[in-house]
Image (cartoon, rainbow, N blue to C red):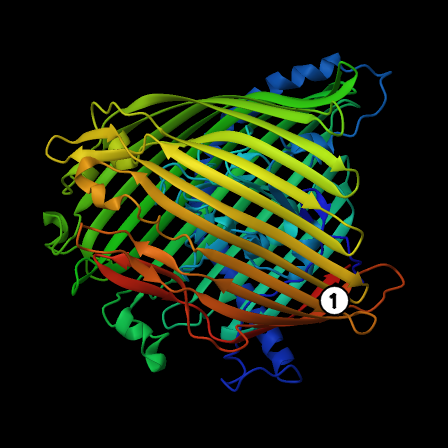
Amino acid sequence: MRRRGEGMTVFSTPVSFRRRRNGRSKCLGGQGPRVGATIIPCALTALIRHSMIFLRFFIHSSGSVMAACIARFATMPLLLAGLGALNAAASESDPLVTLESVVVKGQLLTTSPDQPYSVQQFSQEDFRERQVSQPEQLFREVPGMEVRSLGYGGVANSMTLRGFSGGGHGGDIGFVLDGIPLNEASSHADGYADLNVVIPLELRAMTVFKGPVSALYGNFNRAGVVALESRKGGQYAETDLSFGSFRTLDAQAAAGSKIGGATVNAAVQFYDSDGYRPQSRNNHGTVSGRAAFDLSEKTQFTISTRLHTARADTASVITQAQYNDSANFLAKDPHVQNDGTNKGYFSLRGDLSHSLSPDLKALFFAYSTTQSFTRTFTRLTNATTWQQRSEDYVRDVFGYGANLNAEKQLLGKPFNWVAGIEAYDESTRYKYADALNNGSFTANTLTAGVNGGAGTLNRDLTIRSASLLAQGEWVLAPLFRPSFGFRRDRISGNCEQRGVETRTGASAQCGSMAAFTVDTPKLGLRSTLVPGTLEARVSVAEGFSLPSDAAKFTAGLSVQPTKFRQTEVGLTLTPGTAWFVDLAHFKIDSRDEVALIDLATLTYANIGKTRRDGIEAQIRYTPVEWFEASAALARTHTEVIESAPGTAYLVGAEITGVPKTMATLVATVRPWQGYAFTAIGRSIGRYSVRQPTSASSGAMYYDGYATIDLMASYEPTQAEGKRQRYYLKVANLTDRRYATSSGVSSGVQTYNPAPPRSVMVGASLDF
């Protein structure tokens, strides 16, 4: 049984919770959940059926992607062979050094108890106990963080953090796996990141940095960074299999072992569901692997790879009339065509870590990704007309870098630091077409569409970045533990047309991108006010965002990136073993927002300011061994401070997609040995979905929602230490009708319907 104090870490303090996920069974004949003799044969039948789909799926979708990536990656062994010359410097008389912890840049700082800003970490055990199919399902336990699910298989959801609403589906949040960015510079949206390529069971930890506080990551970190770290080393064999509503199957497995002279870690996931709406069948499969070789006592070479494929049908959004109609709430609007997604992803990476001395280690890496992504989507282009658009991306990335990680003494006091360089070259072949008829061109497609359509685009986009970074923490005294960080990013790029394009206007520009050089400093202080009871922290950090694609590929652009400055003050209180309280107040001000001030001449200017401020709280109460409760609370205020002269009516308006209040309450009871029952309540407050469009036209809002989930589990004691855990999860217990996300399309408010009450049963087993 998991003891209190184990598991999720908040500001470097352990906290334990339980989780749930969704499902309602069509396999059970639409009669609701039954756990006995009916569901087990359904699960076995589904497992066999889905396994066959999985094999066909990979064979059909992955061959061309893998071949292209291997061809692009052919030069990588030459680079790593050159770096391998460090091995010659290793002395046979030096003691054995464990190098597994060096494979992620700045890992010592990522897990440090001296961080002066808000950080929340989820452990490997959290992923096992909460039985999630996606890492993002844990974000609801982060104060001020919300996943605004779109309900489209194979498409990244939008995420809110620190007053920004464009994480995941846009570029407000940085996502990195073992230090390598997952954000896509020119794929669907600037900074788009799809966490479906990550298997929950493969992760050792997931750390959420709030705000642009870490110098280890550059673009796309203005709201924060989610750093995912895979498992490295260890001897284990684990599975997590669940099945339930809508014939949903989630099968995960992970293993670690020594094979010959290599330390090997591998994981696999297959997810398949009929979906809770018509035309919402979706599935994806992922395989990841890592092999580490000790070249000497001081040097280790690691190679890792990842293969992911996904396919889905999507039912698009619903309008207000359908939202108000309980009988048709989950139905597909009759205007929606054969929308769907198809994705293939393959990556290959090599790392060389070398211990220069017992307290100084070097890491070199080279990395390549090849990805294809196609999506069709029907949406409103005016108040009465729907049109289908198609987007097609083929993306290639090559990156490399080096960094030093040190645990030193400065003036006799511990001083940990990391410094490095890195570069990425990302090219995207991009095609866009509008006014389609079930995926086929029409006459309107080539004449820029009708009723708000945008025509066609056919181009190559290139983004190149080179960065210098440094970050350190100095433990001078318990009362005075300063930290600093500095990062310089130089980003350039280009757009070239590949064929005829019919789109016109500002969004159709295609030229060389100006080279931007951006410096982002970070400074903080952590202090122990009462040893073992009260910690304080204060920090100031800057981040940035580049102009949008429409702006940065416009010839003669003379604007600078938008800068964001965050200030934060926080307190952590631990009065005894029963209570943990963490409070944080933050303020993020932007300057030099980029606005199009003259459409006729395509003139942009740095004009506009915004403010985001709020209070966040994480509370845990564990009075006895058999009961624990927790709360993740946030209240956020956003406001436009300055706007262009032609849009002065925006001053005072809220930023869209940011709830005023967010709360998650969790209570767990363990009445008998091995049994646990958890209730989770989630409340999302009102948020703006459209700012005013004129002095006489007001904003539009969504009122938010509240849900309750339940989870029950049984974990018998095993003499050999191998874990067995069986669980039942009920999501949306009250069968509430609500939307996980709301927006505005061509002046019409739209909604993404949430799943109804759903049930999943599963088992988490060690072998």
Residue at x 61%, y 40% (from the top left corner) = 570
Image position, residue 652 (x, y; %): 31, 46
The answer to whether 519 is drawn above or below residue 751 in the figure is above
Quarter of the rendering occupied by the C terminus: bottom right
- SS for dot 1: strand
Image position, residue 388 (x, y; %): 23, 58
The furthest residue to the front: 529
Q: Nearer the viewer, residue 719 or 603?
A: 603
Q: On the image, numbered disc 1 is attached to which residue?
A: 725
The answer to whether 506 is drawn above or below residue 754 in the figure is above
Is residue 224 among what the camera can see? no
Is residue 405 among what the camera can see? yes
Quarter of the rendering occupied by the N terminus: bottom right
| Left or right of 605 in this view: 482 | right
Q: Nearer the viewer, residue 604 or 129?
A: 604
Q: Nearer the viewer, residue 423 or 111?
A: 111
Residue at x 42%, y 74% (from the top left corner) = 737
For residue 209, what is the image quadrant? top right
* Number of numbered discs overlaid on the protein picture: 1
Give the class, few, some or many, for how many residues have Cα within 10 Å of label 1's Cα (few <14, many ≥20): some
For residue 117, what is the image quadrant? top right
Residue at x 76%, y 13% (from the top left corner) = 411
| Left or right of 322 in this view: 434 | left
For residue 597, what is the image quadrant? top left
The answer to whether 87 is drawn above or below residue 136 in the figure is above
| Amino acid bearing label 1 | Arg
The furthest residue to the right: 719
Image position, residue 701 (x, y; %): 33, 60
